[in-house]
Image (cartoon, rainbow, N blue to C red):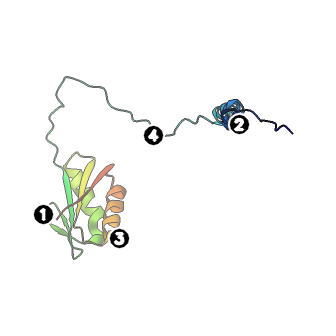
């Protein structure tokens, strides 16, 4: 009896890669088509125009309010009661032409007092209130 020889060993070890490449390309096309391109949302920043002229020099006295660690409120180097902030700011505005104030709070000052000072400054007619935290 004769034995049948099945081809060489090299023929049996070869793997056809064409079907696998077809599947990979089909998956790639699927992911490209199904990917949604979303525009990220953000805030538009409106920057002022650059001007070569210097800012006008005005003799405006600024309002400085300081909140100490123990809760005392100093307005232009004078101690003020928290219930009298609106009246003091209004008298300051009667003498000076300004629309801004700076509230400097001690890092360990109670936040409620600082917020109350800011609210009363806005109630008194100050449009721009800056908050500074310092030592």
Element type at marker 2?
helix
Q: How far apart are the two marked residues, 3 and 1, measured between alpha carbons?
A: 22 Å
Residue shown at 71% from the left, 36% from the top: 12
Q: State the residue in front, 109 or 38.
A: 38
Tag 4 or tag 1, which sits nearer the N-term?
4
Element type at marker 4?
loop
The label nearer to you, 2 versus 3, is 2
Q: Which mark is residue 12?
A: 2
Tag 2 or tag 4, which sits nearer the N-term?
2
Tag 3 or tag 4, which sits nearer the N-term?
4
Q: Position of residue 107 (x, y in %)?
A: 24, 67
Tag 1 or tag 3, which sits nearer the N-term?
1
**Quarter in which the N terminus is drawn:** top right
- For disc 4, the marked residue is 43
Residue shown at 24% from the left, 74% from the top: 71
Residue shown at 59% from the left, 34% from the top: 37
Q: Is residue 57 left or right of residue 3?
A: left
Q: Would you identify the image quadrant in which residue 80 lies?
A: bottom left
- For disc 1, the marked residue is 77
Q: Which mark is residue 28?
A: none
- For disc 3, the marked residue is 112
Q: Is residue 113 left or right of residue 73?
A: right
Q: State the residue in front, 56 or 135.
A: 135
Label 2 with label 3: CB-CB less than 8 Å: no
Tag 1 or tag 2, which sits nearer the N-term?
2
The label nearer to you, 1 versus 4, is 4
Q: Is residue 53 above or below residue 69?
A: above
């Amino acid at each position: 009896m004769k034995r049948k020889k099945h081809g060489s060993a090299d023929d049996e070890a070869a793997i056809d890669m064409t079907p696998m490449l077809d599947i990979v390309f089909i998956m790639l096309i699927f992911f490209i088509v199904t990917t949604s391109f979303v525009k990220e949302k953000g805030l538009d920043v409106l920057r002022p125009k650059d001007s070569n002229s210097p800012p006008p020099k005005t003799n405006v006295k600024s309002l400085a309010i300081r909140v100490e660690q123990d809760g005392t409120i100093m307005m232009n180097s004078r101690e003020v009661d928290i219930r009298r902030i609106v009246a003091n700011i209004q008298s300051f505005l009667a003498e000076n032409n300004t629309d801004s104030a700076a509230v400097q709070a001690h890092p360990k000052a109670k936040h409620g007092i600082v917020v109350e000072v800011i609210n009363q400054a806005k109630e008194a007619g100050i449009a721009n209130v800056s908050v500074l935290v310092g030592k």
